[in-house]
Amino acid sequence: MIPRLPRIHRVATLRRNVRLPVWADVALRLAAVLFLIFFVVLIHYWERQGLVDAHDGEVSFLDVVYFTMISITTTGFGDITPVSDKARLIEAVIVTPIRIAVLFIFVGTAYTFLIKRGWEKWRMARIQEQLTGHIVVLGFGVSGYESVSELIQRGTDPSDIVVMDPLESRLSVAAALGCNVIAGDATRNETLIDIRVANARAILVSAGRDDTSILIVLTVRHLAQHVPISVVVRAEDNELLAHRAGADNVINPVRFTGLLLAGSAQGTHVADYLSDLASVAGSVQLVERPVRTDEIGGSLSQLATGGLGVRLYRKRQAYGYWTPEAQDLQPGDTIVEIVHAEKDAPAGGQDAPQDAPAGT
C-alpha cells in the first residue's frame, strides 16, 4: 500500500491596490528614456559639424545615433569626439543632465521592481501574520460590494477590511476601494487560517449560493468560535440551516425586498424611510451600541445621546421600547437606536461586480 503524502499548503499573501499597473509603469519609464535619447540624437545631428569621427572624418546619421548611445551610457570609446566649443557646451549643459536623468530612471526602475515591490510583499506578509480586529468579507459580489462600501462610508478604514474571492475581477474592484484582497476558496480551512479569521472583529459571508454560504459559515465557525458571523441567504428554508451552522445574523435580501414592497403598498413613504434608515447616506441611521454608564437605570426612550431607542437586547432576548424591561436599563444591555446622520455621504465609487454564484 502506497502511503499518502501530506498535502503541502502554500500560504496565500494579502495584496493591496497599486496606484499604477506594472505594465503602465514600465511603459512610462521606457517612453521617457526613448524620448530623451531621441532628443539627444536631434541635438547631436543638428550640431554634427562640431563632431569629429577618427575613423573616416565624416559624421553620418548612423554615427550620430552611435555617438548618442555611447555618450548617454557613459561608455565613451573616443572614436567620435566633440571638438568645437559649441558642441562641447551642448555636451556639458544639455547632454550631461539628460545622461544623469536616464541613469536615475534606470536606477528608479530597479528600485521599484526589485526592492520596493519585494519590500511591499514582505510588509504585507507581516501584516497578514499580525491581523487582528479586522473585518473579513467572504465573497465580493453585489452584496459584498455594497456591504464594504457601506462600511467605508460609516468610517471603517479600508485597510482594516480583508476581502476573499476566487475571481480576480472582483478582487480588483475591492483593491480599488483600498481593501486588502486575497484570492482563495473560503470553504477551505487553510485559506481562512491565512487571513486569521479567529482574530477578526466580524465576518460577512455572501458567496452567491446558499449551499456555499452555509458551508463557509460551518467552516468559519469551526475556526472562529466567538467571532460574529453574518451571512446572506436567498431561500427562506435555508435561514434555519444558516443559524444552525453558526451564523449570528442571517440576512435574506428577498425577504427584505418583500418588506419594502409591502410597506410601499401601505404608504408611499414607508419604503423610502426604511432605505434611508438602513444606509449611512440617509439623514437618519440605525445604530447598535452598549448601554452607557450614565444611562443605567433610565429608560430606553430617554437616552443620553438624544437618539430614539427602539429595541433593547438583554441576555440574547429582544425587548421593545414599550416593554417593562426597557424602562430600567442594566449593565451589559445592548441598545438599538435611531440617530441623526450628521456627516454627508461621499460620492459613489467603483461599479459593483456581478453577484453571480461562485464557490468563494
Image: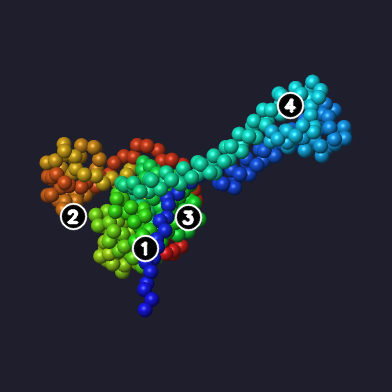
Tag 2, which secondary structure?
loop
Tag 4, which secondary structure?
helix
* Residue with the mark numbered 4: 91
Q: Residue at x 61, y 44 (%)?
A: 26
Q: Is residue 14 above or below residue 240?
A: above
Q: Quadrant of residue 304?
A: top left
Instruction: Give, as a three-letter code, the residue at label 1.
Output: Arg
- Label number found at residue 188: 1
Q: Callout 3: 10 Å neighbours few (<14), some, many (20+)?
A: many
- Label number found at residue 283: none
State if disc 4 and disc 1 touch (CB < 8 Å): no
Tag 3, which secondary structure?
helix
Q: Which residue is drawn at 75% across and 22% down?
A: 89
3 or 1: mark nearer the eye? 1
Q: Is residue 346 above or below residue 275?
A: above
Q: How far apart are marks 4 and 2 (CA)?
A: 81 Å
* Residue with the mark numbered 2: 316
* Residue with the mark numbered 3: 170
State if disc 2 and disc 3 touch (CB < 8 Å): no
Mark before the other along the chain sequence, 3 or 2: 3
Q: Which of the two residues, 224 or 129, is positioned nearer the viewer here?
A: 129
Residue farthest along the bottom direction in this orientation: 1
Instruction: Give, as a three-letter code, the residue at label 3.
Output: Arg
Q: Distance between the residues labelled 3 and 2?
A: 36 Å
Instruction: Give, as a three-letter code, the residue at label 2.
Output: Arg
State if disc 3 and disc 4 touch (CB < 8 Å): no
Q: Distance between the residues labelled 1 and 4?
A: 64 Å
Q: Which residue is drawn at 40% across and 38% down?
A: 344
Image coords of residue 189 (percent x, y): 34, 61
